Amino acid sequence: MTSGGLHHRTCSLCEAMCGIVVEHRDGEVISIKPNRDDVLSRGHICPKAVALKDLHEDPDRLRTPLRRTPGGWQEISWVAAFEEIEARIGDIRARHGNDAVAIYAGNPTVHNLGAMLGIGDFIRALRTKNLYSATSVDQLPHMVASWALFGHQFLMPVPDVDRTQLFVCIGGNPVASAGSIMGAPGFEKRIDALRARGGRFVVIDPRRTESAAIADEYFGIRPGTDVYLLLALLHEVFKRGQVDLAHLAPHVDGLETLREAVLGFDPQVLAARTSLPHSRIIALAHDLMAEPRALVYGRVGACTQEFGGLTLWLIYCLNAVTGHLDREGGMMFAEPAVDLTRAYGSRGHYGKFHSRVRKLPEFSNELPVAVLAEEITTPGQGQVRALFTFAGNPVLSTPNGGRLDAALAQLDFMVSVDLYLNETTRHAHLILPPTSPLERSHYDIALSGFAVRNVAKYSPPLFPKPAGALHDHEILAQIAQRLRKAPGSVTGRVSLKVKDAVARRLGPDGTLDWMLKTGRYGVPNAGKMKLLGALPGFGALRKLMRATDRRPVGLTLQRLLDAPNGVDLGALEAAFPRRIATPNRRIELAPAMFVADLGRAAAALDAPVPSLSLIGRRHVRSNNSWLHNSQRLVKGKPRCTLMLHPDDAADRGLADGAIARVTSRVGMVEVAVEITPDIQPGVISLPHGWGHGRAGVRLSIAGAHAGVSINDLVDDQRIDALTGTAVLNGTPVEVVAA
Ligand code: SF4
């Protein structure tokens, strides 16, 4: 807690983790400026940082629990809310079983220390198979590929952008996003530096994005065909016999299987499907083979397509066989102070159970969110009758949002832990608002693992918790405690119960301190930690403290408190073979599930190409659906427009600014047209996160800039069959004048 004045903090809104300097007086934020001395962001912030003030001071932000009644929303006490949850959930579980209660966790969860540390306990108390999150709409293929190749779902490589000479970006827009699964604040400056040392930045995307605008070379690819581009690139590498597995070679299996599978494709046919000239693909393959410091990075656009799993797998393979995986200037692995790949997170598992209706496989106990609506509306044993949403707005952020919107209205009971009465939470029976980001401490426990430099930064709360308010983790803990009171609910492994009990006792900051001390850069002799390590459930911790590659530098919470600009822990460094986490400690380049899925991609090579394909887009002033209630972020030219190529506009008689009607198999929207040559013919684009015009929301500014939801057009039946990831990009649509 702070008195007024200037305070150094880390922005908690996105993966870039920018350092900010906040000035406040008498409880009011006066300014938010960049921290030029921050160890990671070096003075960069984006326009969203200032929205932390708007979020904190927003009169629409909920501060008291609400109950929905026939007469409207009524404020209630926390105790009344928790009692109602205990009674209603207890009744539903007693009559229909644990799986009748589902949970959806949204993207902000991962930016929240308390939530990250508390949600596992909450989920274990629910004991449901119906666990959903934003993972299956934005990053699941990365996690499945990392699990299958390297043995851990969170062992995801990140671009060594500050040392590379050739950066190939597929389906990502880091200029707008500041990086994703790549914490790279000030990305443009990093690309300027790359160019100054003689390097090149290449962007592959159906739209000439903000990132493509600063690229040295741009490939306008057909949506959904990255898998074919990657197969063509790999084909050339294998055909030339120029495989360079570098230091990984003694630790790699599956190379021959991969080679055989790739060489079975005709590169000319592959190139034709991408709409890119074969000669350009060949040239890019040669550039990748010739440049010792090169990398191929793929992000949201690459993984949210019909072959997203294959695409991410092949990106990893291409980096590996061209000698650019786990090598300086290539795709490397961060080694954060709190390392989820070492001691705390599950390695991952796949297909242990399947969704009830569509039989899609789980990954790490989570089902694809594309099945949530049907799990609510399809009668039978295991039907979802109650739902918890945590910091999520799936009506706007998941496929066929209209169907989910209708499904939520059928639930017997719904509870939302959320700051706002939005398009999703309006269906809740209870809304429980946590404290604002400026009222809680912050450490990026997950995202530090994907930063382009190893750093550790901690922010204490800027403002005290208001009287009567609860933090997210306190809300989760209260509910979990009550759920456990139900008869027969206290089961599960002793080790997990001990772990949860210790974490509850220490609280988020105490747990973080303990994680830092025992981590790679912690204290040499962890003292009392050794005693903790002797408890059941702490085997991984004992292993962590004995790890031979520990480099203790005395990192503790106090040390971070004493370092308001953060602590620099060094550049990315080679991690393999010491961090390979597969059971046989070898990298598997050709997991059977991926090789088998190539048959699906081969069969689709001849599929008809839609006359128009819809893709999403991101803007630097937008963060999914939840920052549109900030006037400073939504003001100016409307950003929720339908981008359309001039030829496609002319064919349909559409002028710039005209209203178009866009129709897909599942829905229709009407939206203003923005004609631009920056999109490929046959492709149209809408940004995601909009569509605030639904009745019953309490978002006065967003409501005045409603826009339309792309997810009212995205088909929930189109998923990547391998991973269950929603196909957000490449939806076949028709466009006519409205
Ligand atoms: S890029 Fe913007 S939103 Fe993201 S951390 Fe930096 S200032 Fe915050």
Image (cartoon, grey):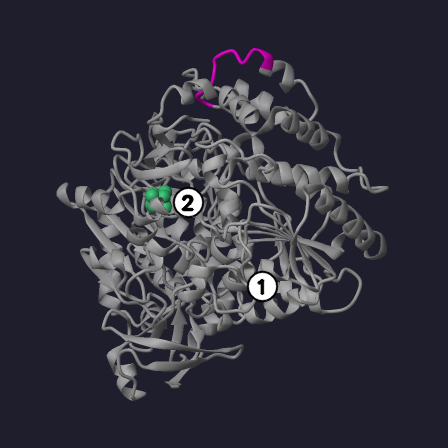
Question: In this image, 527 relative to 336: left or right?
Answer: right
Residue 709, relative to residue 200: is it above or below?
below
The region drawn magenta spans 520-528
Q: Is residue 509 visible?
A: yes
Identity, as a three-letter code, of the amino acid under mark 2: Leu
Quarter of the figure with residue 214: bottom left
Where disc 2 sits, the SS reads loop
In the rendering, which numbered label is found on residue 185?
none
Q: Nearer the viewer, residue 234 or 294?
A: 294
Residue 496: name its quadrant: top right
Position of the C terminus by quadrant: bottom left
- Label 1 within 8 A of ligand 1 by Cβ: no
549 or 341: nearer the eye? 341
Give the residue at mark 2. Answer: 13
Ligand 1 lies in quarter: top left
Residue 262 belongs to the span the image colors magenta: no
Residue drawn at (43%, 21%), measured in percent from left and top?
521
Q: Main secondary structure of the magenta part?
A: loop
Q: Amino acid at mark 1?
A: Ala
Quick one: 69 or 499, which is closer to the camera?
Answer: 69
Q: Is mark 2 within 8 Å of ligand 1?
A: yes
